[in-house]
Image (cartoon, rainbow, N blue to C red):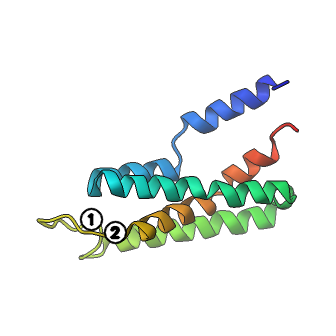
Amino acid sequence: MISWQFLTTAFVVVIAPGTGVIYTLAIGLGRGRWAAVWAALGCTFEIVPHFLAAALGLAALLHTSAVLFSVVKFAGVAYLLYLAWQALKPNGAMAVQAGKSHEAGHRIARRGALINILNPKLSIFFRGCPR
């Protein structure tokens, strides 16, 4: 039997766009359909490490340890700031150019996975799932 608390939490997590959704939309708007597919693949693949962490009890450790949670959270902040710096450089992603730049799909997927894996929200969510 699924609880209403779980359904409400799941609804809020799904309806509120996270960094993975924003990344996928930005890549899709800037680089096209196939780049967005690669970004979505990378963002979706990162669910596996979060699921394994929950299954092995590591998510419970993240949930109870404020220090470990802060380390993961600030690592995610640092990575997002790094990506912002890369985008704002004179020849970065925000530079206006006549043609679309081409980037390998696996690099787009890897970046999406890193963005989401450094977001501890999913581990906390899996930790709270009813058994």
The dot on residue 94 is 1
- Check the image and report above or below for 83 versus 36: below
Of residue 30 and residue 104, the one placed in the foreground of this image is 104
Judge whether 86 appears above or below 4 on screen: below
Q: Specify the farthest residue to the left.
A: 98
Label 2 packing within 10 angstroms: few (<14), some (14-19), many (20+): some
> Mark 2 to mark 1: distance in Å?
5 Å
Taking the image as shown, residue 108 lies to the left or right of residue 75, namely: left
Is any part of residue 63 visible from this angle? no
Q: Quick one: SS at disc 1?
A: loop
Q: Are marks 2 and 1 in contact (CB under 8 Å)?
A: yes
Residue type at mark 2: give it: Ala
Residue 83 sits in quarter: bottom left
Q: Residues within 10 Å of mark 1 (few under 14, many from 20)?
A: few
* Vertical arrangement, residue 90 with respect to residue 58, above or below: below
Mark 2 highlights which residue? 87
| Identity of the residue drawn at 34% across and 69% down | 87
Q: Residue 66: where, in percent of width, then height?
A: 81, 61
Within the image, what quadrant is residue 89 found in?
Answer: bottom left
Residue type indicated by callout 1: Met
